[in-house]
Image (cartoon, helix red, strand yellow):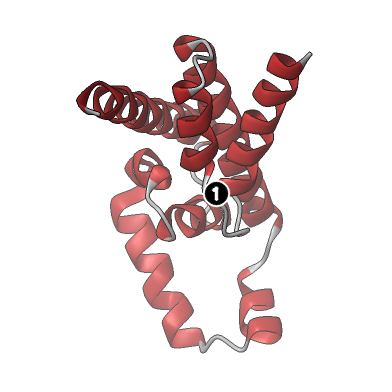
Amino acid sequence: MAAKLGYSALFFASFLAATIVPFSSEAILAGMLLGNFEVVTCIVLATAGNWLGGMTGYWLGYMGKWEWLEKYFNIPKERLNNWHKRLNRYGVVLAFFCWLPSVGDFIAVGLGFIRSNMAMVALLMLVGKLIRYMVVAWLILEGKLLF
């Protein structure tokens, strides 16, 4: 029962961490890995939750309109045009970097706004987030061996 609760918490924390809610899933992942939870299961659940959170951001951007940003968030049109140009310049490849703290959430939303190919965004985002959690898990477990 406790294991199921822990795995659910990791999934939910990872989902939240991929939204604009400031949250760190790495702390929960570290606690679980140091508590001898199954490594592969933790990586898969953290990746899946974080990926779904990122895709939620993409979907919100996809449903949004550029005019809303100007109207409701008071962002000048010239700044929006600059963002639009940058997103179009680098395109769907940016999805790989959605794992980055702080900016990753905005990348996902921006890719939705410019209507980037959803399948490619999903794939590249998944790969980036999987690599991130594999590296984080490795660092946690290697650090455990050091102490």
Q: Amino acid at mark 1?
A: Arg
In the rendered image, the vertical position of residue 111 relative to residue 25, given as above or below? below
Question: Which quadrant, please, contains the N terminus?
Answer: top right
Q: Residue at x 52, y 48 (%)?
A: 24
Residue drawn at point x = 58 percent, y = 38 percent: 14
Q: Position of residue 58 (x, y in %)?
A: 59, 47
Question: In what quadrant of the picture does the C terminus appear?
Answer: top left
Q: Which one is nearer the viewer's eye here, 112 or 147?
A: 147
Q: Is residue 73 above or below residue 141?
A: below
- Dot 1 lies on which element? loop
Measured from the top left, where is residue 33 in percent x and y? 46, 22
Q: Which residue is mark 1?
A: 115
Give coordinates of residue 36: x percent, y percent: 49, 14
Q: Position of residue 69 (x, y in %)?
A: 63, 76
Image height of 7 relative to 74, above or below: above
Give the residue displayed 55% in from the left and 49% down from the top: 115
Query: In the shown orientation, is residue 97 left or right of residue 72?
Result: left
Q: Residue at x 66, y 22 (%)?
A: 7
Relative depth, front residue between 140 and 73: 140
Q: How many marks?
A: 1
Question: Viewed as shown, does residue 13 lie left or right of 131?
Answer: right
Q: Dot 1, crowdedness within 10 Å: few (<14), some or many (≥20)?
A: some
- The image quarter containing residue 141 is top left
Q: Check the image and name the residue furthest to the left.
A: 146
Extreme residue in the right direction:
1
Does 53 sit left or right of 102 as displayed? right
| Residue sitting at the far front | 147
Q: Report which quarter residue 140 is drawn in.
A: top left
Closest to the observer: 3 or 23?
Answer: 3
Q: Residue 48 vs residue 71: left or right?
A: left
